[in-house]
Image: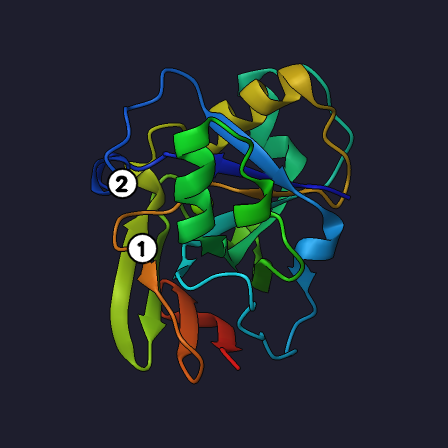
């Protein structure tokens, strides 16, 4: 399986990192080894001094597809959950400055913890999914799928022009504004509406 991550998909987040609004979805990938088994502790990596959370809605793909038509794109989604696209922001800044790829900032081991998934059919409206992240009990990020620059369908269509999607693949759909640092001892909790889907202790 593979993990595809969309960058710059919420206007306010694009602005907070002083980036330009994209004309097409921007994506990068994390390897399977970036998954953190559920209920496992997360250890602060030694190679960064600026570890940022990015709380995102995550799609789980349920069948093989290439060149997927936008009208049928949601048929490739089995369920939706919450994930953290952990980013070593200091390393990423350096990569950007030097025009280098982002992998050392984004694709390291356990950089993509996932929470529980909710079946697609349980949502009334996929264009109105509210989600949030709390750090030590305080809400630090709040988003809604209606504010995405590129919808779930548009993302699937665009990505599948280049890369075949397979059952079990994961797509991170971008983070809303409010990204920031974590340190050892912090507790992150992710919600879809008022359902707690993710709990992660930073060790
Ligand atoms: Mg992200």
Based on the displayed image, in which of its 4 quarters is residue 10 positioned?
A: top left
CA distance for labels 1 and 2: 9 Å
Question: Left of 153 or right of it: where is 65?
Answer: right
* Place of residue 19 in the rendered image (x, y in percent of width and height, measured from the top left): 28, 30
Q: Are marks 1 and 2 in contact (CB under 8 Å)?
A: yes
* Place of residue 72 in the rendered image (x, y in percent of width and height, measured from the top left): 60, 23
Question: Can you tell me which quadrant of the image ligand 1 is in?
Answer: top left
Q: Residue at x 47, y 54 (%)?
A: 88
Nearest the camera: 97 or 182? 97
> Would residue 203 be seen by someone viewing this image from the given angle?
yes
Question: Left of 5 or right of it: where is 150?
Answer: left
In which quadrant is the N terminus drawn? top right
> Would residue 174 be seen by someone viewing this image from the given angle?
no
Q: Is residue 152 above or below residue 116?
A: above
> Which tag is nearer the camera, tag 1 or tag 2?
2
Q: Residues within 10 Å of mark 1 (few under 14, many from 20)?
A: some
Based on the displayed image, in which of its 4 quarters is residue 51 positioned?
A: bottom left
Q: Residue at x 39, y 32 (%)?
A: 97
* Place of residue 163 in the rendered image (x, y in percent of width and height, measured from the top left): 70, 23
Q: Residue at x 74, y 24 (%)?
A: 164
User: Reading the chain from its start, which is encountered first: label 1 or label 2?
Assistant: 2
Mark 2 — residue? 17
Nearest the camera: 24 or 62? 24
Instruction: Report the coloring of the rendering.
Output: rainbow
Q: Is residue 66 above or below residue 10?
A: above
**Numbered disc 2: secondary structure:** loop
* Place of residue 169 in the rendered image (x, y in percent of width and height, measured from the top left): 71, 42
Q: Is residue 6 above or below residue 123?
A: above
Q: Residues within 10 Å of mark 2 (few under 14, many from 20)?
A: few
**Numbered disc 1: secondary structure:** loop
Mark 1 — residue? 179
């Amino acid at each position: 399986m593979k993990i595809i991550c969309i960058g710059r998909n919420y206007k306010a987040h694009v602005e907070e990192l002083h980036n330009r609004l994209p004309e097409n979805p921007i994506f990068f990938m994390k390897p399977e080894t970036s998954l953190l088994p559920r209920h496992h502790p997360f250890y602060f990596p030694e190679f960064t001094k600026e570890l940022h959370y990015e709380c995102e809605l995550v799609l789980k793909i349920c069948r093989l597809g290439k060149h997927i038509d936008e009208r049928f794109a949601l048929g490739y989604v089995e369920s939706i959950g919450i994930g953290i696209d952990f980013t070593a922001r200091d390393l990423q800044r350096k990569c950007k400055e030097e025009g280098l790829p982002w992998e050392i900032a984004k694709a390291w081991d356990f950089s993509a913890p996932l929470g529980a998934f909710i079946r697609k059919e349980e949502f009334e409206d996929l264009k109105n999914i509210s989600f949030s992240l709390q750090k030590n009990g305080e809400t630090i990020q709040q988003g809604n799928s209606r504010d995405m620059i590129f919808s779930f369908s548009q993302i699937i269509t665009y990505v599948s022009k280049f890369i075949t999607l397979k059952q079990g693949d994961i797509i991170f759909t971008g983070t809303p504004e409010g990204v920031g640092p974590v340190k050892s001892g912090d507790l992150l909790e992710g919600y879809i509406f008022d359902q707690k889907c993710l709990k992660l202790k930073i060790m």
